[in-house]
Amino acid sequence: MSLLKVSHVTKRFGGLTAVDDLSFDVHEGSIKAVIGPNGAGKSTLFNLLTGFDRADSGAATFLGGDLLGRRPDTVVRRGVARTFQNTQLFEELTAHENVLVGVEPSLRAGFVRSALRIGIRAEERDARERADHILRLLDIERWRDVIAADIPHGVRRSVEIARALATGPQVLLLDEPAAGLNGAETQSLAAALYRIRDHGATIVVVEHDMGLVMEVSEEILVLDRGRKIAEGPPLLIQKDVAVIEAYLGEEVEDDDV
């Protein structure tokens, strides 16, 4: 089932076309990677889907409803969350508190109930338990009470993913989650992505680490100068001549997959 459908989306910045007549589908329960050289339009695509930029033309539908042109907070409430290339944590808050920030938009208590403190204690307890569950899911619960400023880079990446996951998304967009990670941290990230997927979130990941991409993705979308040049399963993508010329530089051997 197609959960997210992008149809003929174009975005220009002056004379530069960052995303050019792009169409693709994201199927429910999958991990889809988006790859391409720097400047290919990958982060712009995420910005368009999450309301940080407005498309010049085209459409994107999520669960059958229009997604483009909505405010970022509305996109989150509809069930699409994202992370950014550069981690954006609240440095003075602990890992647990950062994740609680993500839980907040999904709390059911309205303004009147909040003012009267009716049912708030139960929801606060549920929010804390949910945050703890997500920290365990990402295998970073031991950093629960450490302030973000003191958390190492690899764990910061996981905390940001946890915060996005706390909003309860059906689609999770991850922008360069492996950037700056060492080999062991990248393997931990791969395992975490599988757990996230198995807990019900569909994942779209922009990533330069081809080892991670080939390991976790079921389908890969390849962009070059804003246009789609290939789309398909990893074994086909790594042998696609256009992809090799535009991005990979050389064919990836089967033994390295």
Image: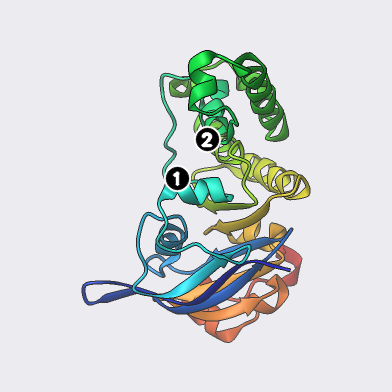
Residue farthest along the left direction in this orientation: 14
Q: Are marks 1 and 2 in contact (CB under 8 Å)?
A: yes
Q: Earlier in the sequence, mark 1 or mark 2?
A: 1
* Residue 163, image x, y percentages: 55, 35
- Label placed on residue 63: none
In the figure, 163 relative to 199: above or below? above
Residue 99, image x, y percentages: 56, 29
Marking on residue 73? 1
Q: Residues within 10 Å of mark 2 (few under 14, many from 20)?
A: some
Which amino acid type is shown beneath numbered disc 1? Asp
Q: CA distance from mark 1 to mark 2?
A: 8 Å
Residue 145 in the image: x percent, y percent? Answer: 57, 15
- Taking the spot 74% from the left edge, 69% from the top edge, the residue there is 1
Name the element at disc 1.
Answer: helix
Neighbours of disc 1 within 10 Å: few (<14), some (14-19), many (20+): few
Q: Which residue is mark 2?
A: 105
Residue at image position (72%, 65%) is 218
Residue 157 visible in rendering: yes
In the image, residue 4 lies at what x, y percent? 60, 65
Q: Between 135 and 67, which is closer to the camera in this rendering?
A: 67
Quick check: 212 left or right of 242? right
